[in-house]
Amino acid sequence: MIEMQGVQMVYPNGVSALNGIDVSISQGEFVYVVGPSGAGKSTFVSLIYREEKPTDGSIIINGVHLRKLKERKIPYLRRDIGVVYQDFKLLPRLTVYENLAFALEVIEENPKNIKKRVMDVLDLVKLKHKARQIPDELSGGEQQRVSIARAIINNPKIVIADEPTGNLDPETSWEIMQIFEEINNRGTTVIMATHSRDIVNAIRKRVIAFEDGTIVRDEDRGEYGYEI
């Protein structure tokens, strides 16, 4: 599913974000990516969906060598990868339904299939009753649910979540985590960068811990392990 060997990332300003990363993630795993700010977590996840290109090393996603991937092929890679952001990134003038339908329209999904798929994912995130509202009419937790729905609208093999509960209150964060668990239970690989000690320690999954651009810990059913 995801294979990294000897991955290094040095930004143009000389900052070294990742140093010799070797990691393998299998289909259907749920992985937390943890570590202090600036440890390399966001760079790690951005490499998976080819937001960044590594300076050195090999990254293979679903059999695709990312360093060899032509720019015009990146959108096709991303059809198998859903991304959930901390700040939602919804289209503010479109309704909830239109935000999700648009994600299918851009990949030229058959119009006959769009309505059913949109309503199915809204049912999963428990927002069918909000389909005609715009993002500003929703709470932060509801907007994040829409963001999750958009990430899974195309049945991706991988969902990447970068601090998905960072702007949410604790109760809402637990509700969001239940959705991610359900997505994972359906066979989707989930990779979540997070600073939430409570979530990581309560919902035990694989933990990959970063410090200074290197992996210092990789444990099944691990703990958060950092003072915050």
Image: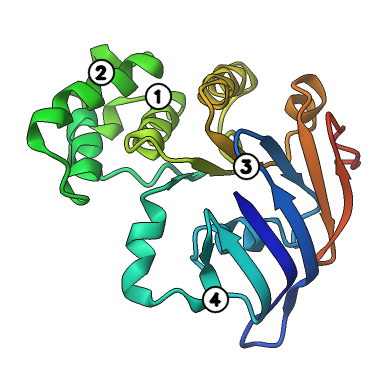
The reply, left or right, for residue 190 in relation to residue 133 is: right
Mark 3 in CB contact with mark 2 (< 8 angstroms): no
Mark 1 in CB contact with mark 4 (< 8 angstroms): no
Residue 200, compared with residue 103, is above or below; it is above
| Residue 169 screen position, x and y as percent | 60, 24
| Residue tagged 3 | 191
Callout 4: 10 Å neighbours few (<14), some, many (20+)? Answer: some
| Residue tagged 4 | 67
- Measure the C-alpha gap from mark 4 to mark 3: 21 Å
| Residue tagged 1 | 142
| Residue 89 screen position, x and y as percent | 37, 47
- Measure the C-alpha gap from mark 2 to mark 1: 9 Å
- Under mark 3, the amino acid is Ile
The reply, left or right, for residue 202 in relation to residue 87 is: right
Q: Nearer the viewer, residue 161 or 29?
A: 29
Numbered badge on residue 130: 2
Q: In this orientation, does residue 39 appear?
A: no
Rendered image quadrant of residue 118: top left
- Viewer-nearest of discs 4 and 2: 4
Mark 1 in CB contact with mark 3 (< 8 angstroms): no
- Measure the C-alpha gap from mark 1 to mark 4: 36 Å
Mark 2 lies on a secondary structure that is helix
Query: Which residue is the extreme one toward the left?
Result: 112
Q: Earlier in the sequence, mark 1 or mark 4?
A: 4
Residue at coordinates 53% horizontally, 19% vertically from top-left? 182
- Measure the C-alpha gap from mark 4 to mark 2: 41 Å
Mark 2 in CB contact with mark 1 (< 8 angstroms): yes
Mark 4 lies on a secondary structure that is helix
Residue at coordinates 33% horizontally, 23% vertically from top-left? 121
The reply, left or right, for residue 37 in relation to residue 166 is: right
